[in-house]
Image (cartoon, rainbow, N blue to C red):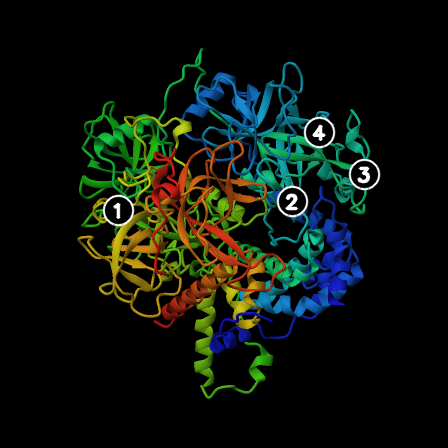
Amino acid sequence: MERTLVDQARTGDRAAFDSVVRSRIDTVYRTSLAILGNPSDAADATQETFVSAWCHRNDLRDPANFDAWLGRITVNACRSMLRKRSRKAVREIPLIDPVSEREPASTEQPLDVRTAAADAFDRAFGRLSIDDRAILVLHHLQERPVAEIAATFGAPVGTIKARLFRARAALESALAKESR
Amino acid sequence: MNEQRLPIDIELSGQLARRASGKMPDGLVADVMQAVDAAQERPNAWHLPRIGTRSPQFALSAVSGIFASILIAVLVIAPFMQWQAAGSAYPAERALSTAELANLMSGTALATNTAIVASATIDADPNACPMDRYRTLGVVEAMGSQVCVMEAGTYTGLTGSKSSGVWAFRYLAPGILGLLGQVSPASGAQLAYGATDQWPLAGKVFLVDGWLGSDGLCEIGKWVDPEPGDVLNPTGPEPCAQSWISDKSSPNAFKNAAIYHSPPVATPSAVSGSAASTGGDTVAQVEDLYWVGAGGTRYYDDVPGKYNPPVHGTWAVKSSVGPCPNDPPTSSRGCGFWLVLARVTDLLTEPAPTAFVPTPSPTVAISGMRDSAATPLTTTELGLALKAGIPNDNIVIATTTIADSTSCTTNGTNIAIGAIPGLVPEVCVLAVNDADPAHSPADRTGTFAFKVLAPRLLGYVATVDRKPQGGAYTPDDAWPAGKSIAVSGWITPNPGNDPLYAKCEGLMGEAAGSLDPRASYCSAAELASSATSSGVFVAQALTVDEVHAIQDAGKPGAPRPAQIYPAPGSWLLQPFKPDGSGPKPMPSATGLAACCTWQISGKIEPVALAGDAPTPPAESPSPVPTPGATPTPLSLTGQPIQRAMTTAEFAAVMAGPAPAIGTTFVATVTVGPGGCGPGVSFGAIYGLIEGMGSSVCLATGGALGPDAPISRVTGTFAMRYMSAGMLINLGRVEPVSSCGLVFSPSDKWPADIFNSHTFLVGGYLGQEPAGWVITAASSGSSAFMSVVLDTDAGFTSIDQSRYGVFVVTSEPTPTPGSSTEPPGDGVAFHVRAWVAGTTGPSAVPSTPASVCGPAPTIPR
């Protein structure tokens, strides 16, 4: 059913594409948000992702690879967004999400400790390249199979594993700097 | 499902889930749908802005709102614009002669993408100059040395074996021009059209003298970059702007609100006629302007767009055809539009010689020291370099003396502080620091960074502090406070949320937005000891070309669809003083000191001296390394012939001048445990290389290290130089046979090639439509292997006609459609590095295993 929708969307069926958008938009937005760390940019990247997917729908050869294909577009949209944001020279101050704030603490750490850790993590994560961020998000957050991540990046599985290791090492190094 | 799962880090997963949490913005789905609708309606020739109702100032209420915004923008901004005229000569409104073009191409390298108009004859020869990205059309006649002409999307081909005329080119690299098209002259007496002339249709390329301006389609302040397209087919859109060309900087058409409110509406088949349409179509003249598409030109020629004053110049324009608005994709109709291909560069050439005399001219790098190992020039070498012609504004570093001079005086702007003794004619040195007009060195003998102001005139920039043991500093060294230094390291420009940008809030103008090195204070780069490690943030001064290179790297059709950064190189760093006492005054009260105490002032590249043997193009080193890699092969005893360096030879190389970071060697060594510490920057430590005289460690470079301390092992390793005493292990090289080290693409691979192997392949690396290949021969039909150019390979461009030896790793990979993971059912060959010094042709042919015996078994 899902594959049929993608197939129909690929041929220019807007209704089918709209269905695909509705089924994927949360994933694309969460991925963008995790990579970019900014809701406004994530929304823009989400919009850009689907517009690009629609405009380049003929480039999708195999509907079975749709998610990997869409993932690649998402990462590219995030990269583009990050570049534009950096050139705009605007500092955005993230607000504490009210929904998250209302959630009960999942650990026994005091709020200020958790906030400091989250802040340090975000700053360290922001030091990573967009590809490093993306690969960590796809693997550790979305738990996508390595083969799908490999398809997303257009790289062999072995390379993705090495990149995962490097991205993790880069994050640890950045975290170490933040904790000094 | 037979799928190997890597472990998920719960803590990392939790932090990422927190980042990704929160309610999705209301209306995002609707925004996306509307944006897709708009994209569906968007014609290729006219680019409407991306829209979204989440921006209250710019709700998608009606298209008329867009143009109301335009009108507001014009009415608000136009009175405050300072219309500025600029020169337009290429030179003096005429095409370069063939001799002038030859002179230009044999001289100092031009900036990439320089647009040239020249009269020339092109000999059609599709095989003359194989190149990665563009198809070869032929070579330009009477150039002395070979000048290749490449084809891209805007030109369909030459007719006949020789084609003479006036051509518009873009300079792509020394000896290589890209053809934009054959220029149709306005008349027998005049080459360029006027901005209000009737322009030629039917796909003609022509020149126009006039003002290029643009008007915004988005709300004020929402800047969207133009996009490049391809340099030779620059169909890049201007997402938030629409360009025009007029004979006035402020066209009369804009005084007519009715006209201004009317968007260009394409008329089908408007370009098929022989005369311009006079109705409201996209190719018609609207009072005193033509609407044009100019996104790619703005991108490549650095022409500022929306909300900037119009720019006067000579523009190469083409009448083009694109899909008509609102037509379905299957429509066969076409609508016309004017596409600006390039801004013709103002080339102030010297008078052309009466007859072309081929004169060998050394290649002069853009700035620099004697070599990539950051060895300053001597006084004599400085004289030779200046004689060879270093471009103005470039930085040259030399160990010399600045003596008093009575004959050196001010140039009207800068104060003279002395002269370089021993150079004839005299080379004067002026102070060039804006913040300190009398800026001069305390010690008149030392290593100095000079800016070239004129062929015999230098500006004193700084005294360069040298590392006590010689060579450049690394990011891991302790840098001397307050000193200008040379640093070798891997640069990542503008990495992510760089801290300097975060300090730029509220800044306006060039300091906030420009990437021009003379104005960029609100961005940072990271200098690290390796491609994978974190390093030191420094204030960034990237050239626009470098920025373009970064952006190009990820574009479809780019020669290598991967980022070229981090990239190795040597850099001149100066103390970064945001208080205005540094190299350039800073905007005050920005708090930038919190980020960076150093600023990159320039990239250090080797200088070829006038006394050096000239290198004809056919003998130029290949592959062409990325910035920072050494362009001249090291004199290695063992390569490129069929053996690795011995331990003693390798020890001698390591004890000599520091190679460029990223240089790859192949040597037979013994690696043992201990003595190298845990290793952080370069991945896990693989071991200590024995017999080097000093401690030289081998690191894994980011890959997982051995589970247990390695035992002592002797073998032939491919190793990438990272810093003094530190190399990255690219792999233990597997030989072809008992007497052959370098595979040919025609050799038989090891039977278990599916299990990761590292080996050397000699051949011709190049890019074909289906991807990268290494071929056994430079031309014609020969054995080949398909390869993937690894992100860290260290080079992006290959001269396919040159032989090289490459470090290749085989990796198991699933075949398309397969879900299996390693061991998998396919294999990919990754080119990981070019072995230094292995520019061909191969001195010793591959010796077959049948003669030498089988390769020894290597423990795996």
Judged left or right of residue B44, residue B768 is: left
First in sequence, mark 4 or 3: give its number: 4
Q: Position of residue B97 (x, y in %)?
A: 52, 17
Judged left or right of residue B567, residue B474 is: left
> Who's the residue at 80% across and 62% down the image?
A15
Mark 2, Cα crowd under 10 Å, few <14 / some 14-19 / many 20+, is: many
Q: Position of residue B324 (x, y in %)?
A: 78, 42
Q: Which residue is mark 3?
A: B333
Q: Quadrant of residue B795?
A: top left
Q: CA distance from mark 2 to mark 4?
A: 19 Å
- Chain under callout 1: B
Q: Which residue is mark 1?
A: B658
Q: Position of residue A109 (x, y in %)?
A: 45, 86
> Who's the residue at 62% across and 35% down the image?
B212
User: Does dot 1 land on a helix, a strand or a loop?
Assistant: loop
Asked whether the beta carbons under mark 4 and mark 3 sit within 8 Å of each other, the answer is no
Q: Which residue is mark 4?
A: B203
- Chain under callout 3: B
Q: Which residue is mark 2?
A: B237
Q: CA distance from mark 4 to mark 3?
A: 16 Å
Q: Position of residue B682 (x, y in %)?
A: 34, 60
Compare residues B210 and B727 and report the one nearer the observer: B727
First in sequence, mark 4 or 1: give its number: 4
Give, as a three-letter code, the residue at label 3. Answer: Arg
First in sequence, mark 1 or 3: give its number: 3
Q: Is residue B703 above or below residue B455?
A: below
Mark 1 vs mark 3: tell me if same chain: yes
Give, as a three-letter code, the residue at label 2. Answer: Pro
Asked whether the beta carbons under mark 2 and mark 3 sit within 8 Å of each other, the answer is no
